[in-house]
Image (cartoon, rainbow, N blue to C red):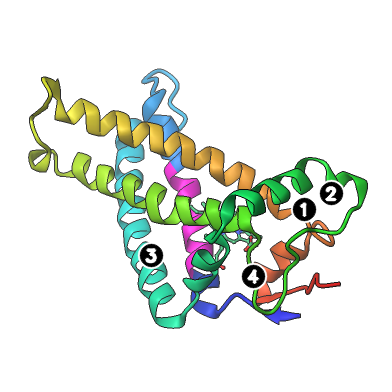
């Protein structure tokens, strides 16, 4: 067993998942709002979406600063070196080797918390996806800060489009992420790890 998930990561992750679920539900409710039969009423969706967005931002700062101070950030950087071949082997394992009960090409060890595929998807999600979502979200909260026109197109419309597209992609990430977390020595190992902090060793 390896202690891979310090308390601040576990707390951040729990709040992050709850804020994300609230943002997806209220975001969808606003996107497909129907005044006759609202899933969540429009004004309430707006209020909850704004509160959850502010919460997600504060929580993100914990993740960002915590990763610098604690050294957890190295798990996001290390596997990214010479990524192309490593990524290919890992994805091949996810779509084929796993179902043939082959050994994982990059097992969890004391040093390697993430395999190359986890490292790249978490790095892109946490250092590109979430910041983009937050910046465009804050822009929509304070529209007077948005450029009025970009190459002749309304800055507000562009910011909104970017926000909705990123939100959609991050929602897809979350569902794929949960599925991938079931792939391991046993389907619940990763979920236990993010609750207790201890992940099962996979080294041969
Ligand atoms: C209900 C929703 C979610 C569940 C059940 C879930 C589940 C898990 C599990 C089991 C792990 C530990 C295994 C691993 O490290 O790969 C994990 C880690 C992680 N999850 Fe999630 N997750 C959820 C939502 C999210 C969302 C919305 C994001 C990002 C926007 C996210 C980002 C991450 C990251 C970055 C890690 C690694 C943290 C670290 O150790 O540095 N998760 N998640």
Tell me the residue that label 1 is attached to.
Answer: 183
Q: Could you say where residue 11 lies in the image, as x and y percent from the top left?
A: 51, 71
Kindly report the distance in space between the C-alpha atoms of the residues bearing marks 3 and 1: 27 Å
Q: Which residue is mark 3?
A: 59
Whether residue 17 appears in magenta in the rendering, the answer is yes
Disc 4 element: loop
- Is the CB atom of the residue marked by disc 4 within 8 angstroms of ligand 1's nearest atom? yes
Q: Residues within 10 Å of mark 1 (few under 14, many from 20)?
A: some
Highlighted magenta segment, given as a residue range:
12-23
Residue 112 falls left or right of residue 149: right
Give me the residue at 84% from left, 47% from top: 97
In this picture, residue 25 sits left or right of residue 137: right
Q: Which numbered disc, 1 or 4, marks the residue that appears first in the sequence?
A: 4
Question: Who's the residue at 50% across and 47% down the image?
Answer: 21
Report which quarter residue 160 is drawn in.
top left
Image height of 71 relative to 136, above or below: below
Q: Ligand 1 is in which quadrant of the figure?
A: bottom right
Read off the residue under disc 4: 113
Task: Tell me which label, 2 or 3, sits earlier in the chain.
Answer: 3
Q: Name the residue beneath numbered marker 2.
A: 98
């Amino acid at each position: 067993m390896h202690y891979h998930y310090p308390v601040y990561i576990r707390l951040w992750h729990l709040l992050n998942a709850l804020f994300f679920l609230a943002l997806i539900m209220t975001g969808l409710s606003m996107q497909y709002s129907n005044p006759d039969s609202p899933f969540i009423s429009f004004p309430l969706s707006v209020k909850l979406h704004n509160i959850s967005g502010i919460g997600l931002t504060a929580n993100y700062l914990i993740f960002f600063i915590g990763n610098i101070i604690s050294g957890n950030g190295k798990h996001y950087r290390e596997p990214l070196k010479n990524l192309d071949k490593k990524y290919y082997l890992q994805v091949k394992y996810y779509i084929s080797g796993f179902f043939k009960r082959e050994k994982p090409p990059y097992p969890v060890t004391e040093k390697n918390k993430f395999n190359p595929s986890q490292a790249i998807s978490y790095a892109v999600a946490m250092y590109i996806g979430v910041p983009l979502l937050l910046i465009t979200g804050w822009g929509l909260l304070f529209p007077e800060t948005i450029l009025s026109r970009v190459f002749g197109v309304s800055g507000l419309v562009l910011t909104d489009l970017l926000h909705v597209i990123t939100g959609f992609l991050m929602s897809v990430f979350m569902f794929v992420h949960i599925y991938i977390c079931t792939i391991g020595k046993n389907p619940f190992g990763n979920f236990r790890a993010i609750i207790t902090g201890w992940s099962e060793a996979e080294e041969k």
